[in-house]
Structure formats: C-alpha cells, structure tokens
Amino acid sequence: AQNFTTANPTATDSCAIKKRSDLCYKNSSSKVLSISIYKRNGDTYDTTPFTMKVLAQKQECWYELRAGIYKYKIEQDAVSGKTLVNEGEFKLEPCENMLREITE
C-alpha cells in the first residue's frame, strides 16, 4: 500500500519556473527496498532509471526532478536477488514535492 502527501508551493518558488519537484519515498516496511523511476519522453521511457535504496523505516529523496510522467518499480533487496513489490506510473507536477509511503 502507498500513501501520497503533497506540499503547498509558494507563488514565488523557482520550482514553478524551472518545472521541478522533489520526490521522496518513505519505507515504513521492515524490508530493504530498491526504487527505480523512469522519465517518460513522448511515447517511450528513458532506458536508464534513477535508482536508490531505501532502508527499512527510513526515507530517501530525489531533488529537483523534471515534472512529468514517470514509471516506477519497487523491489525488495534480498540475498537471493530482487523481488518485485510494486510497479506503475505517476505524474509529478511542478512544485508538488511528493512523498510516497510504502507499507508492508
């Protein structure tokens, strides 16, 4: 399950001009997770993702991502390899500063 929270930007914030936003993942599970996001460009996605590891009960962020549509993949890191937990798409708006929480 995922919960979403957004921040309220100020009118003078440069994120609106630059069309940028922050994206944070909060891992409320007991697992170590690997999160990859792929920016959509037209009808295709970037082949090289942004990837980060989020330890159990921790939060990690990407800063000043370009606004747009992204594909995401959340995997559990284990000794035997990675197991897919969730995948899908989301739209990141300028100044949105999205927080996505991952629970058990």
Image (cartoon, rainbow, N blue to C red):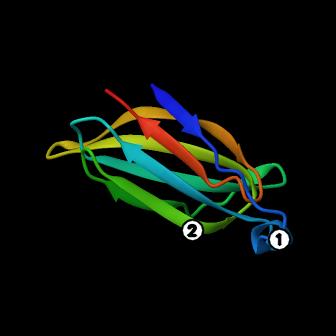
The answer to whether residue 15 is above or below residue 3 is: below
Query: Residue at label 2?
Result: 63
Q: In this view, does 97 lie to the left or right of 1?
A: right
Counting residues from the N terminus, which is met first, the one under dot 1 or under dot 2? 1
Residue, x 57% and y 68% (percent of image)? 63
> Measured from the top left, where is residue 104 in percent x and y?
31, 26
> Measured from the top left, where is residue 27 in percent x and y?
35, 43
Q: Which circle, 1 or 2, is nearer the viewer?
A: 1
> Measured from the top left, where is residue 96 in percent x and y?
70, 52
Q: Which amino acid does label 2 sit on?
A: Tyr
> Measured from the top left, where is residue 78 in percent x and y?
19, 44
Q: Estimate how packed mark 2 is, as few (under 14), some (14 to 19) or many (20 or more) residues with alpha carbons within 10 Å.
A: few
Count the labels in the image.
2
Query: Residue at label 1?
Result: 12
The answer to whether residue 17 is above or below residue 59 is: below
Q: Estimate how packed mark 1 is, as few (under 14), some (14 to 19) or many (20 or more) residues with alpha carbons within 10 Å.
A: few
Q: Nearer the viewer, residue 72 or 48?
A: 72
Q: Which of 44 and 64 is in front in this view?
A: 64
Q: Is residue 70 left or right of residue 1?
A: right
Q: What residue type is labelled 1?
A: Thr
Residue, x 37% and y 53% (percent of image)? 59
Q: Is mark 1 on a helix, strand or loop?
A: loop
